[in-house]
Amino acid sequence: MVINEGIKNKELYEKRENLSKENLKKAIDHVLAKIDQNLERYTNKFPTACSTELVYGEIDNVDWTASFFTGMLWLAYDVTGDEKYRKVAEIHIQSFKERLEKRIHLEHHDLGFLYTLSCVSAYKLTGNEEAKNIALDAAKLLASRYYDKAEIIQAWGDLSDPAQRGRMIIDCNMNLPLLYWASEVTGDNSYKEMATKHIKQAAKYLIREDASSFHTYYMDTETGEPLYGNTKQGYSDESCWARGQAWGIYGFPLSYTYIKDWDLIELTKKVTNYYLNRLPEDGVCYWDLIFTEKDNEERDSSAAAIATCGLLEMIKFLPITDEYYEYYKNAAAKMLSSLITNYTTDINSEANGVLLHGVYYKGGNAGVDECCIFGDYYYFEALVRAYKDWNMYW
Ligand code: GLY
């Protein structure tokens, strides 16, 4: 049984920041200016996952993060209607097609991130049939990572790799929409069934009794028995990696949108309360929720952006009489407002990222206090969600 801590630091979420249309528009214009600064550079190449001294490098379409800039292009097209963004995003689609055909670095579950933001988005926004078919092929490949007995999708590595066998991770919550979508589009329910089974296992084993999350959890693929949880990107196996918790805050409601299992919303409230109770004054988390101000550790703005999107998604389903409704609305506005005011790059600088103070992987010393391309994407998505009625790509 997962406990609900309630909200302990209510004073932080009692007042509503004023996110006026005008301020949101200004923040969106800032993101658009940064995209424009990058457009040519990332037409045939992709940004690295994180920046070095606030400048992203250029790589081929090989990493799990390749779709976040493409997703930003679709958001830019969505809010402006400007064809220049669509044109580059459509060039990216051909790159995603080739990547899938040649199976370039696709032995992982992040097919969801990759093909939802590049191709499902294209199909939903423009009716692009080729993009639809590419995304369906990606869904098929993702489904091949599912274990019947363990009822999970393996996160990383070749399925025969004993070190990765049966390992699910909280991030996978964000990869499941590709499967739900594939069932909707094809009428083949098997994708939805796998995603539904996976999210239930994620809820059962990745979320601990106190509503914090394990980053990763191993299942025995022969017997289906749960084995143990540990971390890859968090501070320790017992701590709670902030971005992992944010993937939970966003990913459980995403599954709710497809399967309407209210338990997922009840769980999200608990996971959210755990997160909100560990935020510093400005509403932007440290990279692991074990830290407090006195630890002098970095923030992870990307986790804050993801959690903001999650809160904005979840409150769509909460009745306004829910005891947390106002707190969640205020918390989302507070986090977004804090990111807008104190966590963005200078518009006229060399920095080609948007969101400052992200942490990609502290233990691996990668992208610490830098821009992270997924942080930029979710920040933009949060702005668009707050600015207009947005039909999501997930
Ligand atoms: N999905 C990997 C990460 O959040 O860094």
Image: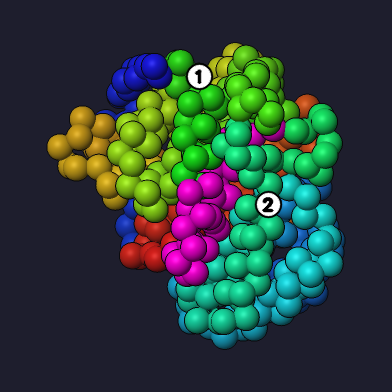
Residue 358 lies in magenta, yes or no?
no
Residue 171 lies in magenta, yes or no?
yes
Numbered mark located on residue 316 in the image: none
CB at disc 1 and ligand 1 closer than 8 Å = no
Q: What stretch is highlighted in magenta?
A: 166-194
Indicate the amino acid at tag 2.
Answer: Ser
Front residue of 220 and 44:
220
Q: Name the residue under label 2.
A: 144
Point out residue 381 in the picture as x, y percentages from the top left corner. Answer: 49, 57
Q: Quadrant of the N terminus?
A: top left
The Cα–Cα distance between marks 1 and 2, rounded to whole angstroms, is 28 Å
Indicate the amino acid at tag 1.
Answer: Arg
Q: What secondary structure is found at the residue carrying circle 1?
A: loop
**Residue 91 sits in quarter:** bottom right
Residue at left 68%, top 40%?
Answer: 154
Is residue 57 left or right of 134 when viewed as pictured?
Answer: right
Front residue of 246 and 180:
180
Magenta stretch secondary structure, dominant: helix
Point out residue 353 in the picture as x, y percentages from the top left corner. Answer: 68, 56
First reached walking from the N terminus: tag 1 or tag 2:
2
Numbered mark located on residue 208 in the image: 1
